[in-house]
Amino acid sequence: MRNTFLVFGNPQIEEDEIREVVDCLRSGWISTGPRVAQFEELFKAYIGSKHALALNSCTAGLHLSMIVAGLKPGDEVITTPMTFAATANAILHTGASPVFVDIELSSMTIDPGLIEEKLSPKTKAILPVHLCGRPCNMDRIMEITKKHNLLVIEDAAHAIETEYKGKKIGTIGDMTVFSFYVTKNLVTGEGGMVTTDNDEYAEKIQTYGLHGMSKGAWRRYSDEGFKHYQIIFPGFKYNMMDIQAALGIHQLKRLEAGLARREKIWKRYDEAFKDLPLVTPAPPEKNTRHARHLYTILVKLEDVKADRDTIQQALHEENIGTGIHYISLHLHEYYRERYGFKPDDFPKALYVSERTISLPLSTKLTDDDVQDVIDAVRKVMDRYSR
Ligand SMILES: *Cc1c(COP(=O)(O)O)cnc(C)c1O
């Protein structure tokens, strides 16, 4: 077995961004400034959206999007329980409620066929999550939102490179939110971005993300002369720093190469696990591009003598770090108690919660690391097979 621990989601940081961060520090302009503006321009060009607004996290972007969407206490937003807590917490922060809709088993994303029965007069928006880098069924979602006059705000934390029928994620819904957290496909330490084609939303996200100060306030100490500002909304401190953008500018250039590398690792995993009592990810749907953010296996509990946690622990003991994406939100204490959920209220999300394990997929993995993961998974699954 491997003699050092393989960390799950290890970020790949290279000399270009290290140099840029050092240059940024030396420049003295370390908070929101020219590098954030540059990163926004580059990101906008990559996605093909009219606007891109950099923030200090995806969570911040989700929160601001909910505010910009005009959510009020008592409103409802349709979303998936198979996601990270930030998705639904952002809805709660406005006083609105998430209304969960179960997933499809093969895609693990929200089942559009179940959305309409959950709509009510209080529904204001749909918040789909492109889980693991796989796009949701956006045709169906957009059709429902048009018919019922709802907004679409997408959680694209896993989906920077994702495409749906020739369109990049980030150009379809009203607002789309990306994450640059350390484990994501592009990392700035902490960071996020909202893309939109709507001028009013863009302006509000920028303003509300920096205390609600009137436009361009970051320039007020520049050589253009001091500028007074007005507070036009009780905003938040959600701005991205130039130190973070310094990382993003260079990470962005390597996105496509990174995806190509992860596709190779993905294929090796698919090949290596064919005969084991586990389900490998479904191939991407036709006319879509999968961002290959998370390689998740589902343990076939019916065919093994252990539960998922035991198998995950055994992999850990083989020095392989893994993740769980996710334990469905309806099983978490706060949601369970507030909304009175029972485990089988969302049977497919429950099914995945009990079986899923995410394997290392960082571009930092060497071919030998990948082989170590394969060997460990094979060894552990053989041990527990019935
Ligand atoms: C990581 C993640 C977030 C939160 O991103 P941050 O940048 O850490 O705030 C939101 N949703 C999903 C699905 C995520 O994986």
Image (tube, rainbow, N blue to C red):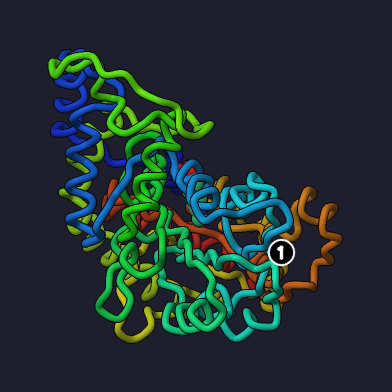
Instruction: List the residue tagged with mark 1.
Output: 306
Q: Amino acid at mark 1?
A: Ala
The quadrant where residue 117 appears = bottom right
- Residue 48, above or below 202: below
Q: Quadrant of the C terminus?
A: bottom right
- Which x, y percent locates residue 63? 53, 46
Q: Is residue 315 above or below residue 170?
A: above
User: Viewer-proximal residue, 216 or 265?
Assistant: 216
Q: Is residue 342 left or right of residue 252?
A: right
Image coordinates for residue 298, horizontal then vertical, percent: 57, 70
User: Could you say whether the residue bearing mark 1 is in a helix, strand or loop?
Assistant: loop
> Which residue corresponds to the image point at 45% horizontal and 27% vertical from the top-left?
231
Q: Nearer the viewer, residue 61 or 385?
A: 61
Looking at the picture, does residue 20 appear above or below residue 375?
above
Q: Nearer the viewer, residue 71 or 232?
A: 232
Look at 78% across and 72% down and name the residue there.
345
- At 46% from the left and 62% from the top, the residue drawn is 154
Residue nearest the observer in this picture, 193 or 198? 198
Left or right of 377? Residue 257 is: left
- Estimate the x, y position of residue 134 in percent, counting from the top left: 41, 70
Placement of 16 over or under 262, stated as above or below: above
